[in-house]
Amino acid sequence: MLEHERSHWSKHPADILAGIDEVGRGPLAGPVVACAVAMSPTVAESLHKSGMKITDSKQMTERQRETCCDALMRHGDVSVGLGWVSASEIDDSNIAQATHLAMAKAVLSLPVTPDFALVDGTPVKGLPCDSLALVKGDSKSLLIAAASIIAKVHRDRYMTDIAAKFPAYGFAAHKGYGTPAHLAALSTFGACAEHRRTFKPVADTLRGNDNEKQRGLL
């Protein structure tokens, strides 16, 4: 989990290195959230040896993610930046551009701009620093894994919070993903302010409602 970090620091020991990941590309509702995490080589080695479970957030339970996120957020020598792009902003561009924007926002919200970043997935344009993209980076890099955990926890908390505002959709349970229960609620109640109107299941629902209105059925 530190192979890529050690490789970079062996050549550039004074560099501020960050890991970047995002969550929320696939849901039909809610924001896409990115996180950037930066730390020194000493802190990275310490966390790696500490026994703290820092790995791909999808391989962790909710409780493990929550515990790890809170520990990282409290750590005085770990810098964290978050970038949020709303559902309406996603509709104004597209999910790929929105994801890259969220990642750039996350880096810019760090206390200090990093010299270099390890990014999960494919290359990202528009970052304020040079970067290396790693496919499945959240299972190969401790910094990216830490970012994936923090982004996941913060987005999940947001979706749980808005569930009270939009109780018909069950956001607390599925976090905006297109589960059968979510699709059924979407069909029954239509879209709310948190839905991504350009995503096909939502767009199809809106189109169907418009057709029914034209026929006088709604």
Image (cartoon, rainbow, N blue to C red):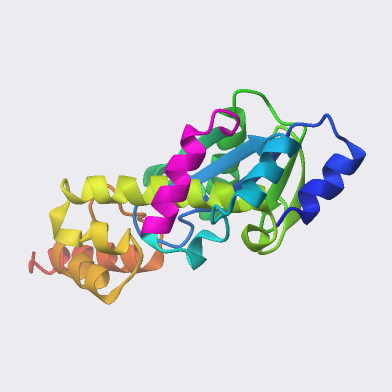
Q: Nearer the viewer, residue 50 or 137?
A: 50
Q: Quadrant of the N terminus?
A: bottom right
- Picture coordinates of residue 202, whole percent (x, y): 32, 63
Q: Let me know if residue 151 is in the magenta part.
A: no
- Residue sitting at 20 percent across and 60 percent down? 169
Q: Residue at x 59, y 28 (%)?
A: 110
In the rendered image, which quarter is residue 108 located in?
Answer: top right
Q: Which residues are magenta?
A: 63-79
> Which residue is most to the bottom?
180
User: Which residue is situated farthest in the top direction here?
Assistant: 111
Q: Is residue 48 left or right of residue 81?
A: right
Q: Which secondary structure type mostly characterizes the magenta part of the structure?
A: helix
Q: Quadrant of residue 64?
A: bottom left
Answer with left or right where residue 165 lies relative to residue 13: left
Q: Kindly tell me whether residue 151 is visible in this rendering.
A: no
Residue shown at the point (56%, 47%) measured from the top left:
147
Residue 102, x across and y down, in percent: 54, 41
The quadrant of the picture occupied by the C terminus is: bottom left
Please state the horizontal and vertical placement of residue 90, each as a whole percent of the image: 45, 48
Q: Is residue 141 above or below residue 61?
A: above
Residue that lies at the very extreme toward the left in this rendered image: 217
